[in-house]
Amino acid sequence: MAMTFGYARVSTAGQTLDSQLDALRAAGVDQRQIHVETASGARDDRPVLNELVEQVQDGDTIVVTKLDRLGRSVAHLVDLAARLDRAGVALRSLSEQIDTSTAAGRFMVHMLAALAQMERDLIRERTIAGLAAARARGRVGGRPTVMTPDRREAAASLLADGQSAAAVARALGISESTVRRHVPR
């Protein structure tokens, strides 16, 4: 017999599941079949979701309030939808009004995935362009190096005197890898 399961997720313990639980119950999901989880959507290792995906069978449906409850990664969401589809499990999103048990629903999931991927690509392109513009103006991002010219000179001198990179690093209060990276032998 086909069953309907709900999945609700919040990222932190300080957030509340109340609105998601209310919406899932209003959509006809039995309270006993609602799986709740507190975990970041960016994490791939969400045990409650993984257990639910393993539990569902052909003909079942998983209902979420929004697609972002399943994951923020477009690739993960598309993979999960495809995995559920192969298992004969429908995915319903209440906010986006998507139901993958229909051809239109499957099409919408793929369209949303393509649009989200395009948005990520555009953000990436803008970020790269912004970093290049900053570099052209002499601004370099990232953490400042701990290897000052004085430290580099001291490290080179100590290494030339036969001290090990580990001993030089301890003496200067820096890591051994920093010594090896900045002072060639």
Image: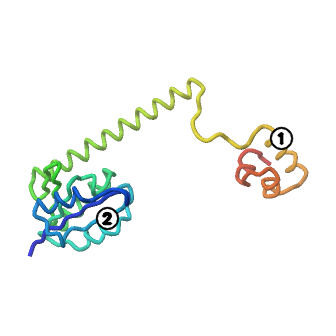
Report which quarter residue 89 is drawn in. bottom left
Residue most toward the right? 161
Which sits earlier in the primary sequence, circle 2 or circle 1?
Answer: 2
Report which quarter residue 139 is drawn in. top right
Residue at position x 81%, y 39% from top?
150
Residue most toward the top? 137
What residue is disc 2 on?
Answer: 37
Residues packed near mark 1 inside 10 Å, few (<14), some (14 to 19) or many (20 plus): few
Report which quarter residue 126 is drawn in. top left
Residue most toward the bottom? 1
Total numbered badges shown on the rendered structure: 2
Q: CB under 8 Å between callouts 2 and 1?
A: no
Residue 146 percent coordinates (x, y) = 71, 43
Type of amino acid under label 1: Glu
Q: Is residue 31 above or below residue 174?
A: below
At numbered mark 1, what does the secondary structure look like: helix, strand or loop? helix
Residue at position x 15%, y 65% from top?
61
Residues packed near mark 2 inside 10 Å, few (<14), some (14 to 19) or many (20 plus): some
Q: Is residue 102 left or right of residue 31?
A: left
Residue 149 percent coordinates (x, y) = 78, 37
**Quadrant of the drawing holding the N terminus:** bottom left
Type of amino acid under label 2: Glu
Q: Is residue 116 above or below residue 102?
A: above
Q: Is residue 46 above or below residue 149?
A: below
Q: Is residue 113 left or right of residue 163?
A: left
What residue is disc 1 on?
Answer: 153
At numbered mark 2, what does the secondary structure look like: helix, strand or loop? strand
Residue 120 percent coordinates (x, y) = 35, 41
Residue 93 percent coordinates (x, y) = 17, 54
Camera-nearest residue between 152 and 48: 48
Q: Can you tell which of label 2 and label 1 is closer to the viewer? A: 2
